[in-house]
Amino acid sequence: MQPNQLVRLTVNGEPAEAYFAPYKTLLEVLREDLNLTGTKHGCELGECGACAVLVDGEPQLSCLVLALECEGRAIETVEGLGRGPELHPLQTAFADLGAAQCGYCTPGILMTAKALLLKEPSPSRDRIKEAISGNLCRCTGYQQIFEAIEEAARRMEHEGPR
Amino acid sequence: MKVLGKPRRRVDGRAKVTGQTRFADDIVLPRMLHMKLLRSPHPHAKITSIDFSKASSLPGVHLVLTGKDFPITFGILPVTQDEYPLAPEHVRYVGDPVAAVVAKDEQTATEALDLVDVKYQPLKTISSPEEALQNPEPRIHAYSELGNIHRLQAFEFGDVAASLKASDFVFEDLYFYEGNTHLAIEQHASVAQVDGEGKLTLWSSTQVPHYVHRCLARVLQIPASHVRVIATPNGGGFGGKCDVCNHEMVAAKAAMMLGRPVKICLNREEVFYMHRGRHPVLMKFRTGVTKEGKLTGMHLQTLVDGGGYGSYGVASTFYTGALQTVTYELPRYKFDAARVFTNKPPCGPKRGHGTPQPRFGQEIQLDKIAEKLGMDPAELRLKNVLKPNTITANWLKVGSIGLAECIKQVVERSGWKTRYKKLGPGRGLGIACGSYLSGAGLPIYWNKMPQSAVQLLLDRSGQVTVFCGATEIGQGSDDVLAAIVAEVLGIDPFEIRCVTGDTGITPVDLGSYSSRVTVMMGNAAIDASNKVKKLIAEAVSEQLEIAPERLEFANGRVFFESKSLTFAEAVGFAEEKFGTIGSVGSYKPPRSPGRYKGAGVGPSPAYSYTACVVETQVDEKTGWITVPKIWVAHDIGRTINPVLARGQVEGSVYMGLSEALMEEQIFRRLPPKLSGALVHKIPSLLEYKSLTSLDMPDVDTVLIEDPDPNCPFGAKEAGQGPLLPVMPAVANAIYDAVGVRIDELPITPDKVLAALKKKKNGEEARVGPTHFPSVPYPDPVLVAPPWEGGDGNADKGSERPKVKLKA
């Protein structure tokens, strides 16, 4: 086995370092070495979207990213979405409108939606469908997820982007 | 109603959007080890030897277990205790676990699996029901009823042959429903630990902690009082976490042997092989109708592909027949069923458990009947809808039925009357209905104890803690529990702390299956809440000098006109008067009128009803099917939380549509040089097709409230029933669009094209099964319907002697 390696990165705005076996994915390092279990896994093959996080603001499937490649990069996970105890508008809308049933795909969809809203503050329903088409949800039938993203977009128009 | 019926954030909603919900694989304990299972690469084989010495000596490996360590079998049903935690000598499907490695990390455990040397002697593989019928040997299980037929069932409620003979028309049709799987996004995970007192705790993504608890005690031969099973919130269940799983027992044994916590998380491919999903079912319907469109009788035969083990199969097989009588009036009914063993992953319960398959057949057949009689298919259904408060031909007692209103709603909202048959080429509408249990009337193992129980603990702070064994699988069972207690006690649901799904500290609830939670847990919660409410009212009555029955509990206060106490103050006075305030409540469903052997599957405290209209657009050049819109109306009895209820209905519609168009759990043979094994064709989330956000149509959802007196505030189920009509409504809509019948699922473009080609060539424009094999169904158990002088018992002499099971 190859020796562990040290990587320094920014996670949810804070500097972090991890020392891990070089084969590990970003998903594994987040969950196992940085104790950020909010990011989920459903396949570890890039098929379900449950592990989506933001890497330098772009949605990435953390199961397909080698953690070694993340030296110096900024990672955002669901744990960093709110401001302290205050929920992000997407989180509020997801909780209020039934967009999270079992909640397992939720962190990945929240992060994907955040990236969408950063680029397109008021996306159409079709754009929302397209943006989250790589995130599988088996519970909701997606309707309430679409509505929650639309509601969050409306709230953020008033409150300003985050 | 202060709480019920109002849209609310679910009580566990915040945890889910902040990543704080702790799923089983999120649990990390000090000194924890990791386990992986070695699974059979053969679909059917004898194990001749296992040498794990190399694996044991790999650095970082702590333990290797094999079948020798587990002498006791298990199974979810008492009649099919046919699985070993690790197979000792006989493997029955690719994926059957044969050994386990526990190591310092997952990587080491995975590497050690390659060092376990298992020698197999392959046996002939049974790959399909036809092969199972043709090959009684080699037996997949020695205990099966006849050769490789696991179980045969036959019941007749009134003389169906006579009914069919007297009918104006008899329709005979074959249908096939392919198997498919749950595909919960969370893979099964468990963590086992021996606690400081030497007792076992298992955290697991299970829908049935109570059954896992019983099973662990038996298989591991330890006192049940020393076992605690904690169901972590499930990342989706859909029936896929209803079985007791091999890995749960193996992880527990390993933790006991090592004295250290042991975790296992299945990978996606393993989840596909563990399966326990929808049974593939071949069906033959013979249905009689009058020229006015009234059903006169039905003879249904099913051939059910069970896979390699029993699982829930005996119950699933009964369910392919039991609920055909609760939707439409059916004066006489005959039902023959056979479940066979094949060398594939075991099938079990998936959303709708055994009922979507015959629902698919019956609702398409009704469409064919309507066409033949020149009737509108919606009108035909309305004409036959069962009347409320009926005992059916097979002795199921049905209470409220909101189906007629459901049909009217979807007809109205979809513009059915002006659009059906009039949308032009390539575009069509289809309608179908369904009904489902609100909880199975009987527990899985026979007992007369409560099926759900709730305990309340209150104190002067005003906090209410509610304990219940019910399991949160995403459907919102914690929210239902909090809402019902809050409604009775007049407080906000967020004032309530739910402690659920923990066999060590919560009273027994049988689990999240058969859509039983709202009804059973809800009734138990009302029982417990009313008891503490009475105590509080008595104490407050003395303080305010108001008769207890005049007091109101609402908005966090206990009051009469201007005399008022906060809820916390009221509990404080109750503590002064009675001591610590707590209560227990329990629920057991009413006894069903059926008395014959086999009457135990089908009874429910209440039945939900759904009607659905699907619109399709079919490209005649490519066979490609798009679904622009679905209208659904669901008779839910009473809505507890409309946000969640709508989510259950739309989630069901989604899953039904996905099954209709693409989902299939299918297998292929590897070439002989690669062992010839029967392997899953598509064990990945990419290739096992399911609908994405791009494919999902708009859904127009209506909740019909027809409260049922057996249910808490009248609330029936919502999580399974709405799936049932979707698949046949799609098939019927495709017929309206392009005039071809696809009588098997999934309905894929290639099947549509094949049927269109037949249509063009002047052949029968249909794709579906054409042959029903000869199945040695036994003579039926004869039970007279209520209106033919029956008393719920079988005719003397028609009940078969009990099948002798060989060990």
Image: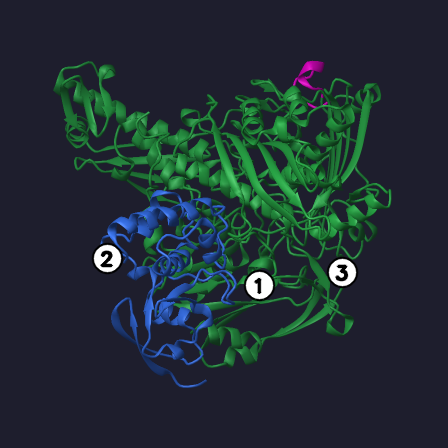
Decide which of tag 1 and tag 3 comes sooner along the chain.
Answer: 3
Is B422 on the left-hand or right-hand side of B67?
Answer: right
The residue singled out by tag 1 in the image is B269
Decide whether residue B785 is among the magenta residues: yes
> Tell me, what hue is chain A?
blue
Quadrant position of residue B490: top left
Residue B309, position as x, y percentages in the image: 65, 52
For the residues marked 2 and 3, what is the alpha-carbon distance in whole angstroms?
A: 58 Å
Is A141 on the left-hand or right-hand side of B596?
Answer: left
Q: Nearer the viewer, mark 2 or mark 3?
A: 2
What residue is rendered at 69% in x and 66% in y?
B42
- The image's mark for residue A83 is 2
Q: Amino acid at mark 1?
A: Glu
Q: Amino acid at mark 3?
A: Thr
Q: Which residues are magenta?
A: B784-795
**Residue in the foreground of this view, choosing between B144 and B25:** B25
As displayed, is residue B272 above or below residue B56?
above
Secondary structure at badge 2 equals loop
| Discs 2 and 3 carry the same chain letter | no
Q: Which chain is green?
A: B
